[in-house]
Structure formats: structure tokens, C-alpha cells
Image: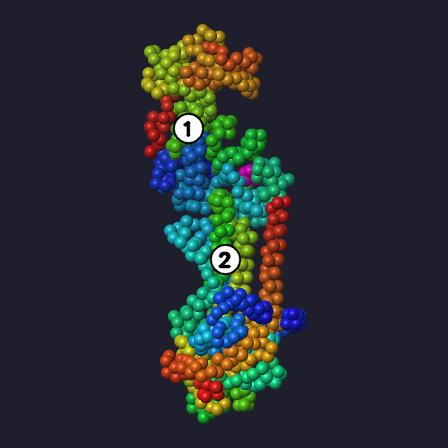
Amino acid sequence: MDLIWDGLRRAFELVVGLDATLLEILGRSATVSLTATAIAMAIGIPAGTALGLLRFPGRRLVAVVVYTGMAVPTVAVGLVVALLLWRSGPLGDLELIYTPGGMVIAQVLIALPLITGITMAAMQALPAELADQLRALGANRRQLVIQLWLEARLPLLAAVMAGFGHAISEVGAATIVGGNIHGQTQVLTTAIVEDVGRGRFGPAIAYAVVLVALAFAINAVLTSVQQRSAAWTQA
Amino acid sequence: MIRAAVAIAVLTLLAGCGSDGEGSGAEAAGAEGALILATTTSTRDSGLLDAILPRFEAAGDCAVKPVAVGSGEAIEIARRGDADVLLAHSPAEERAFMREGHGADRRLVMRNDFVLVGPTGDPADVAAAPDVTAALRRIVAAGAPFASRGDDSGTHAKELDLWRLAGLEPDWPDYLETGQGMGPTLQIAAQKRAYTLTDRGTFLATEGLDSRIVHEGDRGLANRYHVIEVRDAANAACAAEFADWITQAATQRAIGSFGADRFEEPLFVPASKDGRG
Amino acid sequence: MDAGVTVRALRARRGGRDVLRIDRLDVAAGERLGVLGPNGAGKTTLLRLIAGLDQPHAGEVRVGGVESRDRGVERRRRVGYVAERPALMTMSIRANVELPLRYRGADRRTRRSAAERALERLGIAHLAERPAHAVSRGEAQRTSLARALVCEPPLLLLDEPAAALDADARKAFLADLDAALAGRTTTVVHVSHRPADLLGFADRIAVLAGGALRQVSPPDELTRRPADALVARLVGFENVVPIAIGDRGAIELAGRATGTSARDLGSPGHGSGGGARLAAWAAGIELLPPGARPLEATVTGVSPGPGRWDVVLDAGATIRAHHPLAAGPPAPGERVALGLRPGLATIVPPGPEEDSPGPA
């Protein structure tokens, strides 16, 4: 029990004292994962929209690939990215292995199937007649897509949040591709693994608390938007 | 947390042992059950544990649960009483552990040595250095990348000793702390074209590295592994049996031949007096 | 802007077969055309082609002289479209109605005032700030109509707009539709499977079945001279029964003489050919004392209807008749003679699907 209390007390000191290392690691985690999420969004939302709304040969296969991607362990993603970025690998000249840039690539691949898949499902869940009605009201292609995104704003928000949550909370790919180099590629999750391994439970708990707080904030935003919207649609 | 995990592991192993352990333990009366072995990552990453532990388990009724972490953490686990026996290579810390009265018995098991490895081109020309201190100076002078374990392990402790002896402060931009075990650190060093300090066994056993030994052989680079029975261990009988077993002649021969076929040289040199006698 | 519709040699295919084949159909600017047909007749397919939502496999559809192929968005922006289900966005009623103006780049003030006018036109101005999902079906459908009309489109397309409403709401909606269009020269194509929706609304009605036009006529001609048995059923004739036409046009039903000739019904054209059908409104069947006419029948059911008795009879074929309320109900099992009132019954050929196995 002492161990737990000591750890909690130390974690409290670190969080309340805005410990420099904690802030640095949090900043890197957030930067890497937000960048990856933004890129995954820019690709995944249009891709998921196309998969959800259009009919083209191979669509079903792509959908299966996307859904499979949602279930691929992040360490496997990390392994693949590492093999590609390895100095002797096909993209070795980019020198991205063990850099934040490499971690962004891995996290894009981790968030992308989630964002694409949820977007696809959200688009398919829209009433079928909606798109036709909007076209009949005179929407051009761009106006149509934007209107449908607005209509599906809640699940799309959930898709982005899920992608971000998955990216920032995974440890396997971050370790393999990032290497947990202090001051360079160490993020919250790899720092937790390292500190637990070294018996330094205080910082580990502090990092975990920050991660949980992030998850809480994400879900709080989602829930409040959802509740507001639900209240609105049922008013 | 570790305590809880260890407790669960112990219970699981105990449950497994009780059902099938009877009848085979004629040789060591009473010693049975799960034995928590806290050890350094190099013994696992080099493959030594996998090679020799089955012999021990076959010989008696003790089931070994190895927890492979940095030496510092291994000693910390033992200090908390979460391990029965310790196999470490951090002499200064081990002596402190014994002084504090946590250890019942400490015996030398084996040794190998630390080596400095670096990228094949050796850009800092470390190989030309006459001793390890000079080698480290060359690295710092060149501002070359250096990958440090940064994890309080025996290797990390040795590395910090060496910097201190050389009168150098490892804080230039390309001094990389990985916070990880020897294997990952060697990979990172290879990919970053960085130098690093490693035990010879793990270096030889790690595949796919584009690195070579750039400095070796100093007296100061010796690496000794001791086995320590933890005082008042939960499974003191198995701990004693393990310490006896790992220092006995047959086991020492197994340690001495481990890896010789694959790497053209043994990874560890048996060092127990019992083993030689 | 001229918003007549011309359809030429139109073919729409789905699943490898023609679902719509219309060689020629014209809707004059300002005309209201009703399209009547059963489910699966191709009504919605036709409407979508006119709206520019789909492209035909062959032929052309012009709205105001503009061919749909070249001008996707432009063409869709000349029409207002109201679907069976209103498909409102999750936003306020007003925002929904403003959408078409938004797509056309109208500024905020223009959108506001046009939306207000459209909402007032449909009598739902008080709902403007309500969320679209918090209004009744009828209100939602009025919103959909206001949205379609907000740009004052020269052509309004209505796809079963009242089908999802119950009887009273349907009547009220159709009345509001009529009122909203009053004083305007909007061309309207209104699709429905329910003749009552169209008979009082349309200038002409096109009957569509099996993907092909069966008849295009003013409503009163449809109710008096349906082109064939199928059209008669769709228009609502309660009785469409096989008959034989004997010497000098004598009509026989189930092998019995009726005492009426084709000439009496003003249908001499359908001479002695086989397979003719008698299409008779229930109001055109007169119940007379036995012996008054050669055709006799047994009363099998009587129920009160709106301002009449609804009587079911067995005359070798099932016949439905309306009997004056004042006359008192006939008793089930009673034998009566049946007379045909001229002008309320006619002779029609069978529909093609009764002769041949459906359209090719």
C-alpha cells in the first residue's frame, strides 16, 4: 500500500507542480497525435464518405480492409512502419525511424481505419433519401458532401475523437517506431512503460492520470455535444 | 502494481505445481513451488535464461518465474521482497543490498565484458583510442550520437561510471536516452548511427545490427554476474536450491558453452569457484 | 421562364431490363400533370429523370428546352422536388427552407425573407424556429413543400407527397398544396397511386403501369372512358368484370344476358371481340325488383357507406353497387335484378398484362 500512496503523492506533486518533464512529454504526445489525427482526418473522412455513399467495384473489399484495419494491433502497425523506415528499408533515406515524424506516420495508420470506418458507417446510417433530396434542392457535389457531413456531425466527431484517443493511448507502435528516446520521442505511454519497469510509480501514475484526464476531456466534449444535439432533436 | 502481478503469478504457479509436482522431487526434499527470479535484461535478451532454466526445472520441483528488468530495478524488486533470488551485474548496488541486510548469500556466477559498439564506419574514429576513457572523449569531441540505456540498469550504471571516470558530462544533443532494454537500445543505436555501451553477450545475440565493436578489452569493462539469495524470501528453499544449482559444475559448463556454436565465442565465462572446482 | 416538359423515346433500365419506356410525353408550361400508377409502375423513376437526379439510358427529357444530360446542377435548380418522405435536415424548419437559397448563393437577408414568405404560404410560419424533428408528419411535409417552393421553381415535382399521411391530414395537405399554388403558373407533375389525390388537382392524368403509359387524358375522360381494364381499376372503378358481347352488341355477364347493349353504354367500338371487360362504377349499378331486367343477382353483403348503402352481389361474378340510403337496405340472400346506368359504365379491352405475361 505504501507503494501506491507514495506513487499517488508523487504523481500529485508532478501534476500540480506542472513538472517540466511531464509537460514536455504531454506536449509531444499531444503534438504527435494531433498531427496524426489531422492527417488521418483529411484522408479518412473523404475516403469514408466515398465508401459510404458511392457504389464502385471493389468497394466491399475496401470496406473489409478498413474494418480489419480497425482491429489490427498497433504493434503490428508499428512493426510494418519500422520495417519501411528502417535505414536499410525502402523509405530509409527519409531518416524517420526513431523520430516524431515516424511516430506520426505510424499513428496516421492507426487512426486512419477508425476514422474511415466510422465515417463510412455514419454516411450509410444517413437516410437514403437525404442525398437525393439535397441534390434535388440544387446542391452541387461539394455542397452536398458538406451538408451530409453537417448532418452526420456527431458520428464524425466521434470518429475523430476515437482516432485521436486510439493514437495517443497506444504504446506498441510508439515504442517500436519512436524508441522512447528521452527528450525526442518519449510520449506518455512509453514513459509509463519505462517508469513502471524502473519502479518509479510516481511519474508513471502522473502520466497515466494525464492520459485518463485527456480521455475524460474527449468524452466530456463528445457527451456534451451529443446531449445538446439530442435535446435539440427531441425538443 | 508489480507486487500484485507477482502475487498473481505466484498463485498461478503454485496452483499448477500442486497438482503435478508430487513424486518427482526425490533429490531436493521440500524445495518446491514458484521461484521469483529478479534478473537483468541481458540474461534474457542474450537467450541464456531460455537455454539453462529448463534444466533447473527438470531437476526439481521449483518453477522459475523470471522477471527480467534493469539491474537497478531487479535489486529494487528484491529489496521489496517481491523476489526470492537475484541474478544481477551491478556490483556496487549489490554490495549496498548486502550491507543493508537484504541478501542472505552472494556468489559469483559468471562474467563477460562490456564493449563499446558503434556504426560500421566509426565516424568518431573511436577504434583508434588507446583506452575506454579516450574512446569516450572521442565520441564527445565528435558530437557523435550515443545511445544510453537511461534505465538504471547494470549497463547504465557502468556507463555512468565510465563517464565519471573520464570526467565527462553526457549532455550533448545527440546523447539519446532510450529508457529501454539492451536489445531495443542496440537497435536504436544502429539506426541512429550511434555509439553505445553494451554487454558482449547481448550484442552478439542481437541480430540485424549494422554496428561493430569499436572498443573492448579494458579491465574497467569487466561485467560480473552474482546470484543473491534474498533474506526471508517467500520461497527460500527454492532460492537456495537455485543458487546452488547455478554455481555447480554442470550448470557452469552449460553457461560456458552457451552461444559458442552460434557466435564462435561464448557469451558468458563461468566464474564460480564451485564451477571450477 | 418556360418550364414545359418534353419526354422523347425515354428508356430507363435497371437490373438489365427496361423499367420505363415512354416514347412521348409533353407537359405544357403551367400545366398540372398527374401521374397515376400502382407501386413499381415507374412513377418515381420518371420523376427522378425529370428532376435530373438520374440520367436516362436512352432518349431525352427536356425541361424548358434544357436537356438533362448537359446541365446537372443547373437543371436540378430549375425544379422543386417533394419526396414521399420529407428528408429534413437536423436543423430548424427555417434553416431547412433556406437550404435551396443557400445552395444558390443567396445572401442572408434574401434567404430570410424568402423562407418567411414560403413558410407563410404553407401556414407554418409559427414553426420557423422549431427543430425539424419536433414537428408532425403533416408539418414536416409542408416544410418540404415550402422548401421546394422557396426558389419559386418554374417546375414542381411531387412524389406521393401525401402518401405517408392519414386521411384527414392528407386532405388538409392537398388543400394547402392547392392554395400554395393558387395564382401561380408553376408547372406541376404530381405522382400518386391514389386517384383521389389527382382527380381534383390535375389538368391531365397520365396512367403509368409496368413502365409504360396506358392513357393520358383529362381526369373526367379517365373516369368516363378508361383506356383498358387496368386503367379502370386504377382510376377506382369498383366493378371491372369479364363480359361477352353477343349479337348486335348484347352484353352477357357470366353467360347471362344483361339486357344492355354496347351501344347503350356508348361503346360500340369494342364490338364482338373476346376478352372485353365491363367497367362500372358502383353508383352505376341499379338494384331493381326481380324480373325488371334479365340479369339477376343475389345480395351477399350490405354495409352502410357515406350517404348510401354499399351492396355486394353475386351475379355469376362479384358486383358492387351503391344503393340510395333513403331506399332502405336490401336483405342478404335477397334476389334482385341489376340495371346499368348509362354514363357510369363502359366497355374496355383487358389490359395487356391480362393477355400477355407482363411488359417486355
Protein chain holding label 2:
A
Q: Give the secondary structure at mark 1.
A: strand
What quarter of the picture does the C terminus of chain C occupy? top left
Choose between B154 and A103: the one closer to the eye.
B154
Residue A152 drawn at (x, y percent)? 53, 51
In the depicted structure, whether residue C53 falls above or below residue C199 = below
In the depicted structure, whether residue B108 falls above or below residue A139 = below
Residue C149 relative to residue C21: left or right: right
Image point (40%, 76%), residue name:
B208
Number of marks in picture: 2
In the depicted structure, whether residue C239 falls above or below residue C119 = above
Q: What secondary structure characterizes most of the magenta part?
A: helix
Mark number, residue B226: none
Residue B26 drawn at (x, y percent)? 48, 74
Image point (55%, 34%), residue name:
C165
Type of the residue with mark 1:
Val
Q: Is residue C187 magenta?
A: no
Choose between C211 and B129: the one closer to the eye.
B129
The reply to whether residue B77 is in sight is no
| Magenta highlight range | C141-145
Q: Which residue is mark 1?
A: C216
Residue B183 drawn at (x, y percent)? 46, 76
Protein chain holding label 1:
C
Q: Which residue is mark 2?
A: A115
Please name which of the two marks, 2 or 1, marks the residue nearer to the observer.
2
